[in-house]
Amino acid sequence: MQIYLLLQPVNVDSTGVAQKSPRRTNTGDRAGAIPAMIYSNPTKKKVRDRRAPTEVDLNDLPVQVISDRLYRLAEVIAEARKITYEPISGGKVYGEQGSVDANLTGVIGEIAVQKATGRVEQPIFLRGDRGYDLVHNDRTIDVKTTATHMDVPDLLIPADQELRADVYLLAHRFEPRTVRLVGWAPRRVVKDREPERHPGSSLNYVIRPDELTLLFTG
């Protein structure tokens, strides 16, 4: 697992020795870019599915369960993010969550997607990031995680965020340690709309569930 401390990358290998972290670059906008999930069984066939999450049963959407060890790590990162975000009031928070809870939700969502892609060693930032959370199959992915009580929530991207990622992926933390990977939208879909004040007075790019695309299944 890599952890970025105040934007300074530290990569600790299995021996506990700090190694220099590789530099990542943005790959640019790719039409139809999809964050293909990697399965543990390499012979398992992956099927491209263009349906929306609203077109399948809720129980058919992929789910990741966070282990005790990763949950404890997420708590540490979330607390650190609160401290580093203090000049901006603890980061962007929607609904009734406090800033630590909101940051914890975000970190858990990032870990869930990393688990699904088999790339848990990728960096998680304590303050800010590069405009995306991980790289998979040469696509940059920005994970947006919500803990709303809605079964299938909207994908929300703040209007003041620079759209750098190839793909925006919606994760739903519907239980403390359980995350549903709802669907994704490419950057061009996000850019091709006017921001709206939703939820409440927050100005966001809003992608409704029926506009999202399912992840690879198989």
Image: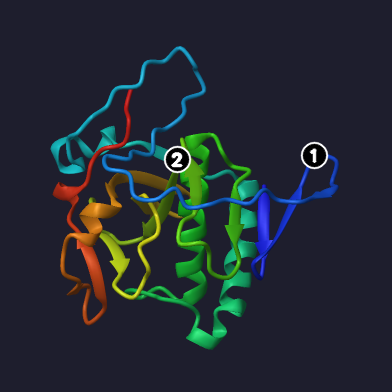
Residue ID at (29%, 46%): 184
Reading the image, the residue beneath label 1 is 14
> Label 1 is placed on what type of residue?
Ser
- Judging from the image, what secondary structure is the residue with disc 1 in? loop
Residue closest to the eye, 122 or 171: 122
Q: Please state if 198 lies on the left or on the right of 128 as rendered.
A: left
Q: Please state if 162 lies on the left or on the right of 149 as rendered.
A: right
> How far is disc 2 from disc 1 in space, using C-alphas?
24 Å
Count of numbered labels shown in the rendering: 2
Q: Quadrant of the C terminus?
A: top left
Indicate which disc, 2 or 1, sits on the residue closer to the N terminus. Answer: 1
Give the colour scheme of this rendering: rainbow
Residue ID at (76%, 51%): 20
Q: Position of residue 127 (x, y in %)?
A: 58, 70
Q: Position of residue 161 (x, y in %)?
A: 37, 70
Residue ID at (34%, 50%): 29
Reading the image, the residue beneath label 2 is 64
User: Residue 36 shows which numbered tag?
Assistant: none
Residue closest to the eye, 188 or 80: 188
> Label 2 is placed on what type of residue?
Gln
Q: Is residue 86 visible?
A: yes
- Judging from the image, what secondary structure is the residue with disc 2 in? strand
Residue closest to the eye, 4 or 108: 4
Question: Does residue 44 sit above or below 161 in this rendering?
Answer: above
Q: Position of residue 188 (x, y in %)?
A: 24, 53
Q: Within 10 Å of the Cα at label 1, are there few (<14), some (14-19), or many (20+) other Cα atoms?
A: few
Question: Does residue 122 sit above or below 144 in this rendering?
Answer: above
Q: Within 10 Å of the Cα at label 2, are there few (<14), some (14-19), or many (20+) other Cα atoms?
A: many
Q: Position of residue 86 (x, y in %)?
A: 56, 84
Residue ID at (46%, 29%): 38
